[in-house]
Image (tube, grey):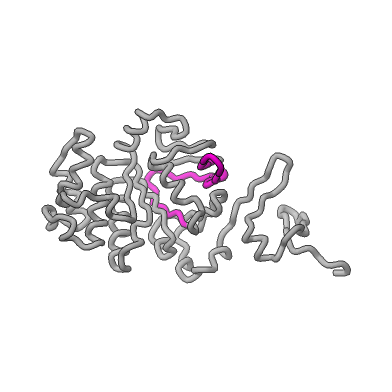
Amino acid sequence: MIHCEGLVKIYKTDDLEVVALQGLNLTVKEGEMMAIIGNSGSGKSTFLNILGGLDRPSAGTIQVGEWNLLKITDDQLVKYKRDTVGFIWQNNARNLLPYLTALENVEMPMMLSGRLDRAYAKQLLEWVGLGHRLNNKLQQLSGGEQQRVAIAISLANKPKLLLADEPTGSVDTQTSDLIMDIFRKMNKELGVTVVIVTHDLSIAGKVDRVVAIRDGLTSTEFIKRNPGLDEVGQGLQEIHEAYVVVDRVGRLQVPKDYLEALSINDKASMELDGDKIIIRTPRQLGE
């Protein structure tokens, strides 16, 4: 469903250039349900915006289904956003129109695409457990209920790819579990590929795969449904393998936090051990 290689995104102003993605490599299979985690500024939201057609990549390769998002035209981008991808924001104000009912909100994307299907809109709200709230306006719904309406809206035009930006970030644990159960149900019953951006490690046990984005450059994959992930918490670096970039003259670009963990500053000791390269703090004379 998704294949990106060497993906780069650079934001430019008159006197400033910010590199948000520095060569990201990632593949997502059709029908997969996965999470992307990373610290603020790591590039995960930039990546999600590119997948959603909300931002244009600067360089590299990014293919979503039949669409090449690096070369897509403006007219094709409209069709891509309307038919291929559904988007859920953490901020409900970006998902919903407050003067419409829950049902009318779900019907709106259908109307904009010329494919109004009230029966399917009602079915979506039934699926997210809001069949009894069809005619309620937003002020009559809790935050968790509004987020479930947002999930129904994102599926209104039957997308192949569902993107969620911190979908459980503003709800309690019980509602978070309910929302993740809904994602899994939609993933299984509709076959939609689900990509969730989050900083919540507890979600890791509820998806097929977790990928960590670091500094907009490396992608690090966790073992599928790692049973110890919730307990690891801040010990994240202990259970994953990172990729480093090799430049054109053969130098390795090692993540800064790895070097800091070993107190490596200006130089390091390196040796070849069979099929491994070992990097460590420089040995002192006489060791």
Q: Residue at x 76, y 59 (%)?
A: 268
| Highlighted range, magenta | 8-37
Res 246 visible = yes
Above or below, comparing residue 223 to residue 66 in the picture: below
Q: Position of residue 16 (x, y in %)?
A: 55, 44
Res 9 visible = no
Instruction: Decide if residue 16 is on the left or right side of residue 191.
Output: right
Q: Position of residue 72 (x, y in %)?
A: 42, 30
Q: How many marks?
A: 0
Please tell me in which quadrant of the rendered image residue 269 appears: bottom right
Please tell me whether the stretch drawn in magenta is mainly helix, strand or loop: strand
Instruction: Decide if residue 87 is on the left or right side of residue 68.
Output: left
Q: Quadrant for the C terminus, please.
A: bottom right
Instruction: Decide if residue 74 is on the left or right side of residue 12.
Output: left
Q: Position of residue 43 (x, y in %)?
A: 49, 50
Q: Work out which residue is located at the far bottom of the displayed protein and give it.
A: 231
Q: Residue at x 15, y 46 (%)?
A: 104
Instruction: Decide if residue 71 is on the left or right side of residue 256.
Output: left
Please tell me in which quadrant of the rendered image residue 272 appears: bottom right
Residue 248 painted magenta: no
Q: Work out which residue is located at the far right of the displayed protein and give it.
A: 286
Residue 13 painted magenta: yes
Q: Residue at x 56, y 49 (%)?
A: 217
Above or below, comparing residue 177 to residue 81 in the picture: below
Q: Nearer the viewer, residue 197 or 100?
A: 100
Q: Position of residue 170 (x, y in %)?
A: 33, 63
